[in-house]
Amino acid sequence: MNIGIVKMTQYDFSGYFKMVNGDKVMKMITGKSIELEKAKTDFEKLIKENSLNKNFEKFKVVNNETNDFLGIAKLEVYEGNSQGVEIGYMLSPQY
């Protein structure tokens, strides 16, 4: 499988919601899945943040051969500390 990361856009909510609404995925992140209205609010914020920084923020993980949505990756600068970054990811349990 050829995997890539692509900056998330407003068209990626469906894949995003499948990830954050999944109990298995979110168990180790927030402890529980996120409901639709909260996910919509969080996604709008994510898209806004993505537009402010070209090199950091949230990305979708995709199978480059099929364009399937595999998960989410993030690269965030620590707030108030431009020397540190956080790398995170969540993948669909089937991957």
Image (tube, grey):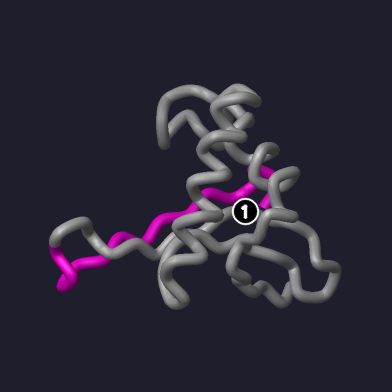
The structure residue drawn at horizontal position 41% and vertical position 30%, both measured from the top left corner, is 30
Q: Is residue 18 above or below residue 66?
A: above
Q: Is residue 88 magenta?
A: yes
Q: Which residue is drawn at 19% across and 67% down?
A: 84
Give percent across and percent down for residue 63: 74, 68
Residue 40 is left or right of residue 53, and the answer is: right
* x then y, percent, for residue 41: 54, 34
Q: Which of 3 and 52 is in front in this view?
A: 52
- As rendered, which of 44 and 78 lies closer to the eye? 44
**Residue 76 falls left or right of residue 71:** left
Q: Which residue is drawn at 52% across and 49% down?
A: 90
Given residues 65 and 83, the one toward you in this image is 83
Q: Is residue 27 magenta?
A: no
Where 87 sits versus 95, above or below? below
**Could you tell whether 73 is left or right of 64 in the image?**
left
Question: For numbered disc 1, what is the local secondary structure?
Answer: strand
Taking 23 as reference, is 87 above or below it? below
Q: In this view, does 89 lie above or below 65?
A: above
Q: To which residue does mark 1 refer?
A: 71
Which image quadrant is residue 29 in?
top left
What count of labels does the image hold? 1
User: Residue at coordinates 64% horizontally, 45% vertically from top-left?
Assistant: 16
Which residue type carries mark 1? Gly
Measuring from the top left, give residue 91's x and y in whole percent.
Answer: 59, 50
The residue range painted magenta reads 81-95
Q: Residues within 10 Å of mark 1 (few under 14, many from 20)?
A: many
Image quadrant in which the N terminus is located:
bottom right
